[in-house]
Image: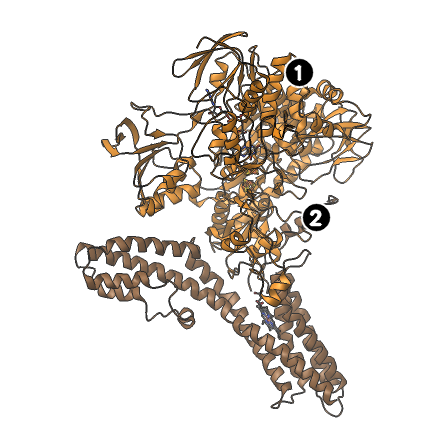
Amino acid sequence: MSDVFKVAIIGSGPAGMSAAGQAAKRGMSHILLEKTDHLSDTIFKYQKGKHVMATPSDLALRGGGYEEGVLAGMEFEEGTRERILGIWNKHCRIVDPSIPEPEHEVQDFEINTRLNAEVVGVEGQKGAFQIKLKDGDTIQAEAIILAIGTQGNPNLLRCPGADHPMITPQLDDPEDHVDKNVIVVGTGDAGIENALGLATDPALGNTVTILNRGTDFAKAKTKNATDLTSADEEGYLRIAYRTSPAEVRDGEMVVETETGQEVIPADMIITRIGSQPPRKFIESMGIEFTSEDRSAFPKLSPEFETTKEGVFVIGALAGYPLIKHCMNQGYDVIEYLATGEAVKPADEPLLEKVFENLPGNRSVDYWLELYRTQVDLFGGLSTLQMRELMLDSICSAFAPGEAIFRRDEPGSSLFAVAQGSVAVEVNPNDPSITVPIEQGSIFGEVGLVSGRRRGATVRAAEDVVVVELSRKAALKLIGSSPEAAEAVKRISIERQMLQLFGSGLTREDVQPLVDSAVTEEITAGKPVVTEGDTEDKDVFIVRFGSMRVEKGEGGHATFLGLIPAGNLFGEMGVIDGQPRMSTVRAAVKSEVIRIPGEAFLDLLAKKPQLRERARQIMDERRRSNEEIESQKSREDGTVDSFSGLAAFLFDEGMGEATDALLIDERLCIGCDNCEKACADSHEGLSRLDRETGKTFAYLHVPISCRHCEHPHCMTDCPPNAIQRGADGEVNINKDTCIGCGNCKSYCPYGVISMEPAPPEKPSFMSWLMFGTGPGPGEASYSWRKEHGDPNKAKKAVKCDMCAGIDGGPACVRACPTGAAIRVSPDKFLTLAKMTEDVEN
Amino acid sequence: MASVPGTRFSEDEKRRDADHISFLKHRRFRWLWVALLLSVVSILGYALIDQEPRPNGGSWYGYTLGTIGLLLIVWLSLLGIRKRRMSEGSWSLKAWTSAHVYLGLSLIVVGTLHTGFQIGWNVHTLAYALMMIVILSGIWGVYAYAALPRELSANRGTMTGGDMLDRIAEIDKKLESAAQPLDRACCDLVLDVLRQDVFHGSALSRLTNSYPGCATRKALAGISASGSDAEARVHELLTSRAEQLAQMRRYLRIRAMLEVWLFIHIPATIALLAALLAHVISVFYYW
Ligand SMILES: Cc1cc2nc3c(=O)[nH]c(=O)nc-3n(C[C@H](O)[C@H](O)[C@H](O)COP(=O)(O)OP(=O)(O)OC[C@H]3O[C@@H](n4cnc5c(N)ncnc54)[C@H](O)[C@@H]3O)c2cc1C
Ligand code: HEM
Ligand code: SF4
Ligand code: SF4
């Protein structure tokens, strides 16, 4: 092909599609290159019938509007996956029998589309790019829009035959595969779920083998691992341990086992061995990223141009995972290319809203610039990054004396002062003792880092203008800017020390400690301090996560206590110079601040008050340890069973929980009133599964949210719908949730389910009097299906700790015997609480 | 610690600090003490107050006790509604159950004194008898609540009721194919097993855990473990089916035992309310 296109658009997701559509509409010469044999691979891979959401609802879609009754721009509105793909196929004149054609009239844009055109390299400069395709073709273009999303490329098998056509990195619907010999490579969650899906329905008649290079399933959730091993024991499938692929041939795979090679017949091989993020490919074009961090995005100008002139990046790859944002950006970049002028960004009205509560009626640009120049942390950000950051943030002004947040409020957001200053009330008993935080600095970082409640009340000291960055936005900022990360770390260490050592200390006092402190990440179960050690003479502060203190060896260790984030440990050995009395290990993935013992002792020497406090802490701990040990010598097994229970609860995630439901099996009569109450307090769906879950001695941990300090479920929620609420609950906003299911796969405790909102039930009284409807509790699946609206979108459903319900969690209130309790680990994991004589 | 305005924080903290204690011990037996006090006062009153012409329901003291008893019974009956209606508010069903049990027991004293020990074949005594039936069944219920949960827990281990059914269904699938090579008679035995509802058995079977018509047991007896390979395999599968079935039946039995007393407690409550209505109307009618 010898034509030079004005623009080549790589990737036909919503971002690329919309760019192509706008280019076509303008008559700009263009080509849309798509790797797969269909449009929009990410959307194509959604579950069949998935209801696609068009959020945020107050964001206008660019290039819309009707001309002669037909939508003039690219179409996108809430609807099923099939509907959206059907319309886009028509825009591109693609016929795909698996996607029904839309019934209404659709604008034909004559988009110049080329499917099966994977781009493998780009050379040249602005005005003359050569785009290399996998099939050897080269395409010439003046400008490039990269819209390849974040999926990346699935890893290939590293053995001969890795490109055999029967190998697929993906399984759409297990039920499409009948009577096949299937080999699954990879024992992460995805591989296991595929293997189980294909094997456990005998009607499909598949013979499934899953290859495991080792002997354990460390990368998978426990539930998946146990399901897989029991499916193996029951003969549904075979797990080949210590086995790896050696060669793929027609109809079979040769594998390497401990005892030599073996041949396994195969009609299909599913490889779930992870994927390569697209970063390397992008960097190879000469495009820079904002930082080394894995979560970083390419550096972009306000017009989405990368550091490689003429190459633009939009969509999920630019950091905007919502379809509407993606589509608007496609439109904007084409307009920019066509006119040479930047379009007023589509998020302008949203930003106006963000700034509307600030005084003085200023423009969006004014505030953006003010924040960028005044807040130290934002110094290195581009305008585009600023816009993105502010979209997820709350900007507000406070009058002198007004509280910005209060001690013990839950909160994991980060604040920055753009104008004025604030005062921190460091002493809970005397609000007049305050520490100032000046213009340009940040506060609230301890909550962000530790995931725990606010440690102090912060008030405006004068008229102030602040910004509150959501946890997601703050983490993104830290991830994309190494300087910001360093600054936050330093400030948070300093403040954590000031908070911990109480009032009377100044920043100057702790400076030597801050300078000599280092942070260390500790994986779950790893010891920080080891019993009997005489070498190590450091003290530690738990930065996030929590520590378990134990005495004794392995399985027989006696549990002494839990140290939550924000607390000091290791002080005993340093103060009295004795060998370590106990082992302190991370209960969950944690981070500690290590402070050299001498620096700590120096500080104690200078500050008698502090010395006194340290003594107090030490004595308290010693007393509690002694009590537990004296109980142990009584040998009635109380302490051993307490230690066993504690270990069990840690395994069940109690080390990172803030408020978890437990069931005392000595009292539970199995009436499921807790579940029924849950359903009736929450539009008819129970968020807890009482009977499922593990039991140890008398405690049962049902399937129910633990409201983690650092919720895994928040990791990758495109609309940022998961937030920590006012009562500390981790809550999913059902209006903004798009039902992508990411949270469900991130939660290690399997507590999230995807369900459509159920139909409303007849009232309780009409059930009681006339027996109408299904009665109290969650209605049966069949009743919901019969009475429900089949078009309701599935959304993520989980416990919200009965947020907004007066009286608190209904599960506990509805338990007739007192078996259901909700606990927070720092209060519950004590000898007194756990050995309480609950019975009659 | 200052509480945060506009949130549930202090309330939630109280909950997290709360004792972890059974309904019987709730708040250090608060309702037991209330009930004892009520009983003692009633007895003292009965002994000390001079009732003319003789102690019975018709004296002013009798009316007082009757009113207290009636109100108590109505309130006790409302537990059935409270239990099923999850509304907002700082109530807990545990506290209600605790009060229910102890105040319910105090009715033995209040109700009996109210009769003035005048018993006969009439609607009044019927109401009294029904009340006692309700109370006795309640005592049985408390015993069940105290004794059975451990058994339930120990029996199920980590399995849920649904898991047990799934496990049986899995075994059945294997049985079906394993039975193919068997002779006609043995095949029929296995077919009987597969055809029999897993919940086969009467209510009585369930409570006593005796299932005389159990096809699995019959098949086990009819198919030899030392026969052909196929027979041995089927025998092995049947053995695990029988074990799984036994666990499920124990599960069903305990759950039934936890509920069966309510089949007396609730209908008798309804009958009691009806009898009370008749009792009250007749008293006023003949007054
Ligand atoms: C299960 C799920 C549900 C979701 N639901 C919603 C929802 O309801 N609403 C919403 O707004 N968002 C939703 N999202 C998010 C949204 O789908 C994505 O963020 C969005 O698709 C990103 O668009 P994109 O155009 O940037 O990239 P993608 O949609 O990922 O498209 C990239 C395209 O580029 C192609 N490509 C990649 N590499 C190359 C190459 N080298 N050469 C050529 N082509 C290439 C790919 O094949 C793909 O077709 C959901 C996400 C998931 C996973
Ligand atoms: C006349 C007196 C009583 C009346 C009218 C009464 C009535 C009721 C009613 C209506 C219920 C609700 C049942 C349901 O809907 O599931 C109930 C439950 C119960 N009653 Fe009684 N009762 C009385 C006395 C007692 C006594 C004396 C005891 C115990 C010693 C008792 C123990 C219980 C228990 C344990 C429950 C179950 C609570 C639960 O599971 O939620 N009752 N009673
Ligand atoms: S949903 Fe899962 S990950 Fe999220 S807070 Fe609850 S338990 Fe933790
Ligand atoms: S709440 Fe869960 S399902 Fe909903 S959008 Fe967020 S990650 Fe996706």
A286 relative to A548, above or below? above
Q: Residues within 10 Å of mark 2 (few under 14, many from 20)?
A: some
Whether labels 1 and 2 share one chain: no
Mark 1 and mark 2 residues within 8 Å of each other at the beta carbon: no
- The type of residue carrying mark 2 is Ser
**Residue A306 quadrant:** top right
- The type of residue carrying mark 1 is Ala
A399 relative to B38 in the view: left or right? right
Instruction: State the SS at label 1.
Output: loop
Instruction: State the SS at label 2.
Output: helix
- Of badges 1 and 2, the one in the foreground is 1
Image point 59% across, 46% down: which residue?
A659
Distance (Cα) linking label 1 and label 2:
52 Å
Q: B283 or B103, which is in the foreground?
A: B283
**Residue B114 quadrant:** bottom right
Residue at the limit of the structure toward the left, as seen here: B228
| Residue ID for mark 2 | B10
The chain that appears brown in the image is B
Image point 27% across, 30% down: which residue?
A255
Q: Chain of mark 2?
A: B
B123 relative to B85, above or below? below
Q: Position of residue B235 (x, y in %)?
A: 24, 59
Whether residue A44 can be seen here = yes
A573 relative to B120, above or below? above
| Residue ID for mark 1 | A342
**Residue A444 quadrant:** top right
The chain that appears orange in the image is A
Q: Position of residue B77 (x, y in %)?
A: 63, 71
